[in-house]
Image (cartoon, rainbow, N blue to C red):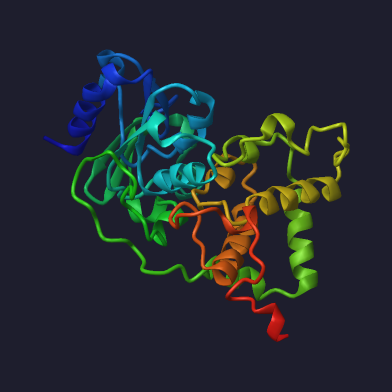
C-alpha cells in the first residue's frame, strides 16, 4: 500500500470521531492542489498528498475552535500547529494530527520560469511524476522538468520534513535535507548597502496591490478581523497607494510574527506579484533564535516575545 492509500485509510478511520478532516485535494488545474475538507469516505477518496500539496492546513484550525477536527500535516504544517498550541490559540484535545514525511513541494513560480516560451501553466492539461522528473502535457506535447529545479526553496533547507507532532504517523521518517539553516538568502540581501536595501524594498513594494493575501494565508495571523491594515480606530495605515504605507504594513506584519513565524512560506507563495516578503520574517526569526534560543513551532513553552523575563540569559543586560 502506497503512502497515498495509507493516508486515506487513516483519514477514513478517524472520520467517525471528528467533524471533518482537513487535507488536500485536486486544484483548479493539474499543477495545483487545494485544501480539502473531508466529512465522508467519498471525500477521503478525493484526498491527494504529494508534490502539489502545498497549502498549510493549519491555517483553518482556529476557525474550528470548540469542534473536534483532524488535520493531515507535513513537517512545516506540524510546526504551525505546534505554534498555535503553544499560544493557546487551539486546544490539543480538539485536534487530531495525521502526520507523514514530506518529500518537498512545488514552487509554481519556478515552474512558470522553467516553461518559459514553451507555454503557460494554465495550458498544462496533465502532469505525471516519474521518479525525479515531472512530465507535463502542454499544447499536445510533453515537457520534462527536473523536480529539484522546481522545488520550493524552503524545502531545500528543510530541517523538519517529518511531522514532529502526530497522533498517527504514516510512512517512514526521512532524514532532513539540512542539519542547520545557513540563511544564505539573507546573506545575499545583507551584502547590499543600506541604500541598496531601501531601494530594493521600495521597488518591491511599488508592485504590491494591497490584497493582503500574505496575511490571509498565514496560519499565525489570527487577528485579521482586527488587523492594523484595516482598522480605523485607531487608524494605523491610510488606504493610499503609497510605497510608504505598503512597506509599513509589511514591517508591522513581520514584527507581529517575530518569534512566531515557522517559515512555512505561505505568505510569499500567496503573493500574486511575487514579492519576497518571507525575507522579513526570516530575518526576525534568526534574531529570535539567536537571542532567545527559541524555534517557533518546535520548542515548547511560551514564545519569548509573549512573556517577560527579568534578565534574558543570552542578553545579559546587567553586564553592559
User: Going 62% across and 34% down the picture, which residue do you hit?
Assistant: 216
Where is residue 241? Give x, y as percent. 85, 39
- Please state if 129 lies on the left or on the right of 190 as rendered: left
Tell me which residue sits at (74%, 53%) in the image. Answer: 251
Residue sitting at 49 percent across and 60 percent down? Answer: 295
Outermost residue toward the front?
A: 310
User: Is residue 272 at least partly visible in the picture?
Assistant: no
Quarter containing the N terminus: top left
Q: Quadrant of residue 190?
A: bottom right
Establish if 19 lies above or below 213. Answer: above
Residue 228, image quadrant: top right
Judging depth in this view, the residue of 180 and 89 nearest the camera is 89
Q: Position of residue 41 (x, y in %)?
A: 25, 15
> Residue pushed farthest bottom?
319
| Depth check, front residue: 63 or 47 | 63
Could you tell whether 33 is left or right of 289 in the image? Answer: left
Q: State the residue in front, 77 or 115.
A: 77
Asked if residue 228 is positioned above or below residue 75 in the image, the reply reads: above
Residue at position x 74%, y 45% in the image: 207
Amino acid at each position: 500500500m502506497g503512502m497515498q492509500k495509507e493516508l486515506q485509510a487513516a483519514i477514513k478511520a478517524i472520520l467517525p470521531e471528528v467533524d471533518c478532516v482537513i487535507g488536500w485535494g485536486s486544484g483548479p488545474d493539474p499543477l495545483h492542489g487545494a485544501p480539502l475538507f473531508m466529512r465522508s469516505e467519498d471525500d477521503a477518496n478525493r484526498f491527494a498528498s504529494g508534490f502539489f500539496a502545498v497549502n498549510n492546513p493549519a491555517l483553518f484550525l482556529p476557525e474550528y475552535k470548540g469542534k473536534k477536527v483532524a488535520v493531515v500535516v507535513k513537517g512545516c504544517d506540524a510546526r504551525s500547529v505546534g505554534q498555535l498550541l503553544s499560544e493557546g490559540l487551539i486546544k490539543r484535545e480538539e485536534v487530531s494530527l495525521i502526520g507523514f514525511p514530506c518529500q518537498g513541494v512545488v514552487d509554481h513560480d519556478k515552474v512558470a520560469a522553467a516553461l518559459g516560451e514553451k507555454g503557460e501553466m494554465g495550458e498544462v492539461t496533465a502532469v505525471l511524476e516519474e521518479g525525479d522528473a515531472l512530465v507535463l502535457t502542454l499544447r499536445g506535447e510533453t515537457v520534462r522538468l527536473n523536480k529539484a529545479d522546481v522545488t520550493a526553496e524552503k524545502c531545500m533547507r528543510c530541517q523538519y520534513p517529518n511531522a514532529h507532532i502526530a497522533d498517527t504517523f504514516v510512512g517512514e521518517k526521512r532524514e532532513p535535507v539540512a542539519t542547520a539553516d545557513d540563511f544564505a538568502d539573507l546573506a545575499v540581501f545583507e551584502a547590499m548597502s543600506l541604500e541598496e536595501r531601501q531601494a530594493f524594498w521600495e521597488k518591491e513594494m511599488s508592485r504590491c496591490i494591497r490584497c493582503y493575501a500574505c496575511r490571509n494565508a498565514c496560519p499565525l495571523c489570527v487577528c485579521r478581523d482586527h488587523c492594523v491594515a484595516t482598522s480605523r480606530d485607531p487608524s494605523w495605515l491610510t488606504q493610499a497607494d503609497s510605497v510608504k504605507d505598503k512597506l509599513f504594513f509589511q514591517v508591522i506584519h513581520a514584527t507581529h510574527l517575530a518569534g512566531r513565524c515557522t517559515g512555512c512560506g505561505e505568505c510569499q507563495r500567496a503573493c500574486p506579484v511575487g514579492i519576497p516578503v518571507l525575507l522579513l520574517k526570516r530575518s526576525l526569526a534568526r534574531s529570535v533564535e539567536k537571542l532567545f534560543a527559541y524555534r517557533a513551532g518546535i520548542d515548547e513553552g511560551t514564545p519569548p516575545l509573549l512573556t517577560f523575563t527579568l534578565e534574558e540569559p543570552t542578553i545579559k543586560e546587567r553586564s553592559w
